[in-house]
Amino acid sequence: MRHCLTFLLFSFFFSLQAQQNALLWEVSGNGLEKPSYLFGTIHLQDKRVFCFTDSMLIAFDKCDILALEIVMDFSDPKAILDKIMIKDESKSLKNLLTKQQYKKVKKAVSKNLYVSMVLLMDKILPVLIAAELMSSQTHKDEKYPMDLYLQKQAEKKEKKLFSLESVESQFAVLDKISIEKQKEELLAVVDSMEVYKQITDSMITLYQHQDIEALYCITNSYNSSFDEAWQEELLDKRNVAMVTKLKEKMKEGSVFVAVGAGHLPGATGLVFLLKAQGYTVRPVYSSCTK
């Protein structure tokens, strides 16, 4: 029932017109020699969200540095995997679920995800499995998710890369969700795959309309299933830490900051926080020309 109500909220928020629908924001002033840019991404491989505007492409090209939540280093894939593997066996699915529940989850993972996830599902946090199952309800048209695609483009153009966070810090945030809540969420996703397809389709439509305010409201509505303390960890504290790092990095040159669109709006979002630090932050309006 919770997920059906969430889907209805999606439809409601989409009917509202946000005052500033923009994925791209220019950051200037406060002593900066060159403007930097904020760009809201969505962590998908669905071609429907890969329609970059002319303004975004121009801003990306003229920036010296690309800042991402995490710059991925694939020179040692095993090292990345080791960082996200659970160390506490009591959190493994076999110890959390009944035999019937485990069988149901394994069936969903086998049907919707890749073989390696089936092999690793006992070593991955339930909330990460739930996220992968939700993502599986979108198309995989592109080779890379958007953030990694931008990283690859920046590497081709020999831009400097900068991580705002680390794999360890992001995993630490997820690990703060109670394991019981994670289990509940995973089982809810497994039981509602068709609903999640509708949800992700609605999110993609909102993203295409650059409606970050509606996306933010939807994200908050969904995250309310967890406790407030975790919500604060998920966005608020991370946003403050990102701004602290960006203040220093933007002094070095023009930075193109590509982070999940949910980090931009709201009273604790990057747009507000940068304005509070004395920067001029203005939306750059443009439409996809494809």
Image (tube, helix red, strand yellow):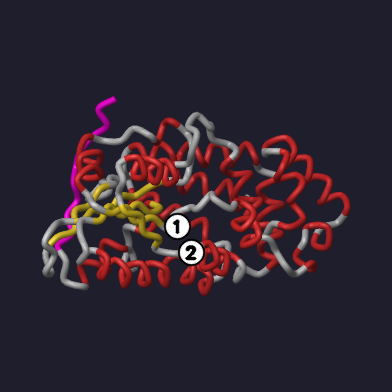
Locate residue 278, reporting x and y percent.
Answer: 16, 71
Q: Residues within 10 Å of mark 2 (few under 14, many from 20)?
A: few
Say which residue appears at 39% left-offset and 46% top-offset: 151
Across and down, in percent, residue 53 comes to 25, 35
Give the dominant element type of the magenta stretch: helix, strand or loop. loop
Does residue 257 appear to the left or right of 280 in the view shown?
right
Q: Residue furthest right?
A: 99
The verdict on residue 232 being magenta is no
Q: Which residues fall within the magenta stretch?
A: 280-290
**SS at badge 1:** loop
Q: Residue at x 35, y 55 (%)?
A: 161
- Whether the residues at callouts 2 and 1 have beta carbons within 8 Å, the answer is yes
Q: Nearer the viewer, residue 98 or 70?
A: 70
- Whole-number angstrom distance, CA of label 2 to CA of label 1: 6 Å
Q: Which one is nearer the viewer's eye here, 21 or 279?
A: 279
For residue 259, side relative to residue 134 (left or right): left
Location of residue 191 by image quarter: top right
Check residue 281 for magenta coloring.
yes
Q: Is residue 186 above or below residue 143?
A: below
Residue 24 is situated, as x and y percent measured from the top left of the image, at: 25, 48
Question: Where 266 sits versus 276, above or below?
Answer: above
Q: Within 10 angstroms of label 1, few (less than 14), some, or many (20 or more) residues?
A: some
Q: Tell me which amino acid carries mark 1.
A: Ile
Q: Position of residue 9 (x, y in %)?
A: 46, 48
Residue 166: numbered disc: 2
* Furthest residue in direction top, as rendered: 290
Q: Amino acid at mark 2?
A: Ser
User: Which of the two discs, 2 and 1, labels the residue nearer the N terminus?
Assistant: 1
